[in-house]
Amino acid sequence: MDKREIAQNLEDHYAEFCDLIQSFSTVDFNHHAEGKWSAAQQLDHLIRSVSPVVMGLSLPKFLLRLTFGQAKRPSMDYDTLVKTYQGALASGGKSPRAYEPKLGGAAFQSTGTAKLAHLIVRLNRLVESLSEADLDQLQAPHPLIGKLTLRELLYFTVYHVQHHQRSVKAGLEK
């Protein structure tokens, strides 16, 4: 997936998630099955997850290279990255505390989706500013699966919203 395809996938999948969240009643937005996150919590988790990606990609390239080094391997393709993440989850990997959601108030349904949509706009601007080579050479840490190239981190960000959208839909069916 090149950077234009990544940006389009980010835009499409996050817009679909935000539309789904906006379609919920307040009751459905806050409903959660035992031991599962509500749609409100899923939204908060995604905001907490995308924010550091935006912050990281905002850093000067030399600082990313100095802090995290340069990739010493080719980027995984999308499917391999997804399998790696699913494997980490299957091995008991959990969201680190910093990414655990909090409960939002009644206004969070609209303010949260607006914030997430704005983060994706910012992220896509940052993606546009990077070269294809930057995406494969620069890297940053992922809390469950270690250092990823920026391309892989963006693949994860595309997959992550789909993963949580499926969870939201499954939560409503119960």
Image (cartoon, rainbow, N blue to C red):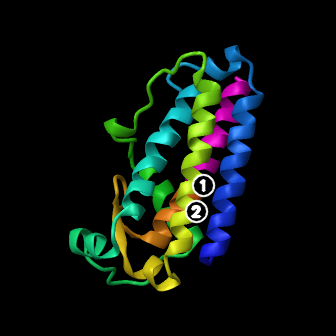
Tell me where residue 169 sits by quadrant. Answer: top right
Residue type indicated by callout 1 = Val
161 relative position to 129: left or right: right
Is the C-beta separation of discs 2 and 1 under 8 Å?
A: yes
Q: Give the percent coordinates (x, y) of residue 122.
A: 54, 56
- Please tell me the numbered disc located at residue 124: 2
The residue under the point 39% across, 51% down is: 52
Magenta region's main secondary structure? helix
Where does label 1 land, which residue? 121
Quarter the N terminus occupies: bottom right
71 relative position to 36: left or right: left
Residue type indicated by callout 2 = Asn
Along the viewing direction, whichever of 12 and 80 lies nearer the viewer: 12
Indicate the secondary structure of the residue bearing disc 1.
Answer: helix
In the orientation shown, which residue stands out farthest toward the right? 23
Between the C-alphas of marks 2 and 1, the distance is 5 Å
Q: Give the percent coordinates (x, y) of residue 119.
A: 54, 49
The residue under the point 48% across, 49% down is: 50
